[in-house]
Image (cartoon, rainbow, N blue to C red):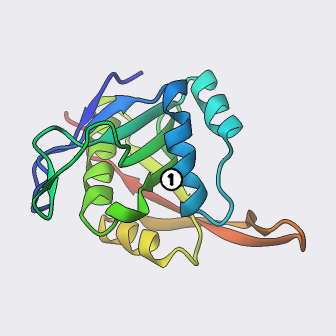
Amino acid sequence: MVDSLHSGQSNTEGISELSFLPMTTADLDSVIAIESVSHIHPWTKGNFSDSLAAGHWAYCVRPQLADTVKGTYLDPDILWAYCILFPAVDELHLLNITVSPKLRRLGIGVKMMNAIEGVAAQQNMPRIILEVRPSNEAALALYQSLGYGQIGLRKNYYPVDAANGLREDALVLAKSIKLEA
């Protein structure tokens, strides 16, 4: 397991660097608070617990003491974002990445993806794959801007409305990661 991730500096005003801390069961209430307002069909606390038990790489992102947004210092106990990664033999599968709705459009998602790509390179994993709803236009635009391309389609992958049995396809995206020689 990777102990910590760090993303480098960028143009994100007031945010110096993200610290990725391993997710623990103590974080799950904060994770669920963000998850439940962020997704049409959110993961359950059990889904996150199962990921932790399975040894997936799970991280929470919190501000550092010096970080500010619009001149206001941020509480380092507040969860900003989180991600769940599944390391396979030769690829890293991004299972879940979510930024708090209050902090979107500040560049945190880009920094997280850059850090995840750095981990893939460090771990000699030449590819990252992920699924995304076609209706999640913001996430799709982010991934495409970072060089992810569609490699497949999973029909009826995501639940939309359990009562009516409606489901949505998933676009499978991937990006090749340049490994150090």
Q: Which quadrant is home to the C terminus?
A: top left
The one nearer the camera, 71 or 94, is 71
Residue at 33%, 58% in the rendered image? 109
Find numbered disc 1 in the image and state the secondary structure of the residue it sits on.
helix
Residue at 50%, 53% in the rendered image? 34
* Relative height, residue 8 to residue 170 (above, below): above
Q: Which residue is mark 1?
A: 34
The one nearer the camera, 105 or 51, is 105
Residue at 15%, 38% in the rendered image? 65
| Left-right relation of 113 to 133 | left
- Residue 55, by quadrant, is top right
Report whether residue 87 is seen. no
Residue at 16%, 44% in the rendered image? 17
> Residue 52 in the image: x percent, y percent?
57, 27
> Residue 93 in the image: x percent, y percent?
51, 44
- Residue 8, by quadrant, is top left
**Badge 1 amino acid:** Ile
| Left-right relation of 74 to 22 | left
